Image (spheres, rainbow, N blue to C red):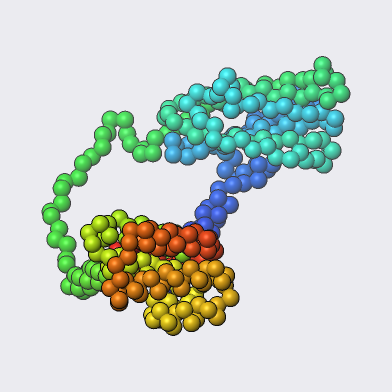
Amino acid sequence: MKPIRSLNIYILIFCCVLLLCCVSCDKTDSGELSDRTRLTRTIERGPLSVTIVLDSDHVTITETLSVQLVATSADGYKVRFPELDSPENAIDDLDLIETARSDDKLDENNNVISTIRYRFEPFATGNLQLPPMSVVFYAPDDPEKKTEIVTEPVDIQIDPVLDMAEDAGPQLADIEDVMKIPVSLTLIWLAVAALVIIIAIVAYLLWKKKNAPVEVVRAFKSAHQLAFEKLHQLLAQNLLSQGKIKLFYIGISNVLRYYIEHRFNINAPDQTTEEFLAELSSANTLSMTDKDYLTEVMHHCDLVKFARHDPSSEDNDKTVRIVKDFIDKTASADCQVDITDAQQQGGL
């Protein structure tokens, strides 16, 4: 892509340089008379004079007409040229496209030369007349002291682009025979190759988009919130009312073990009760009361699971209450558990 972009930049620079050259060639110094001057008329009033200069009084409708007003005055006078861009001063069949006033200059007699240049674009052919234009000289310190010089009207001829006799109409040439455009075999192969390359690129982009790795957004829950959800799910199964006592105690033991692992970083689920209680006794993160409660609950669960102990309803309620109280007492919002994988697998 870089060579194509560089080529486009070079083409753009070349076009800009060519445009600047054309604009430079088209513009002339508005303070001097152009070599194309065809008509010059001067009107004098004492030390004041106005010269109207037309680059040509005979132009085609595709050309522009340049009109200059050159005012000569003694030092101390200011010049007010006509404002032809206002609606009341607009000239029929001529569209004003540019007004340029040059800086004042001094001639060899120390007279001030003020120049303004108007460029018009004709939009009708035939004989037109440039109306009289008023130039006002005034003294800045005395507004009442002013002199007005009005130019004479000037006839202008606007010709069409085609210079044909009045009685001659446009001539239509005969239709030429149908020409067969030669087909280049090389061009056909280039077109086929370009089409194959485009199809390959599109297919690659589609494949790449389809096989792009999916960005996984990690999800977290606090350890106590996760434990309460598991405990509520266990109680919602109504295992005790169905007589599935052992299955209920296995579930509540797992809730407690996983909460301890998440909350205190103790590998409780993979340990036996004796190993877990031995590690628990050396942990400094729990009080002795909490350790005693956990020891009682874990032994009670083992009696049900392995010794076929048949607990009473009061024992069941006490076990659930101890687990709830322990989770609620040791809850911490700072302890967060990554549940992203479990969510993706539908476990939560």
Observer able to see residue 26? yes
Foreground pick, 240 / 103: 240
Is 166 displayed left or right of 333 in the figure? left
* Number of numbered callouts drawn: 0
Foreground pick, 86 / 331: 331
Foreground pick, 316 / 166: 316
Is 164 displayed left or right of 144 in the figure? left
Q: Position of residue 235 (x, y in %)?
A: 32, 57
Vertical order, 49 against 253 (above or below): above
Q: Which residue lies furthest to the top in this view?
A: 144
Foreground pick, 293 / 138: 293
Residue 215 picture quarter: bottom left
Vertical order, 275 against 93 (above or below): below
Give me the residue at 46% from left, 64% from top: 223
Give me the residue at 75% from left, 28% from top: 79
In the picture, the quarter occupied by the N terminus is bottom left
Q: Where is residue 133 in the image (x, y as percent from the top left)?
A: 63, 23
Observer able to see residue 8? no
Residue 267 picture quarter: bottom left
Give me the residue at 62% from left, 46% from top: 28
Vertical order, 143 against 216 (above or below): above
Is 89 displayed left or right of 316 in the figure? right
Q: Where is residue 216 in the image (x, y as percent from the top left)?
A: 39, 66
Give me the residue at 70% from left, 24% from top: 135
In the picture, the quarter occupied by the C terminus is bottom left
Vertical order, 226 against 103 (above or below): below
Q: Position of residue 312 (x, y in %)?
A: 33, 61
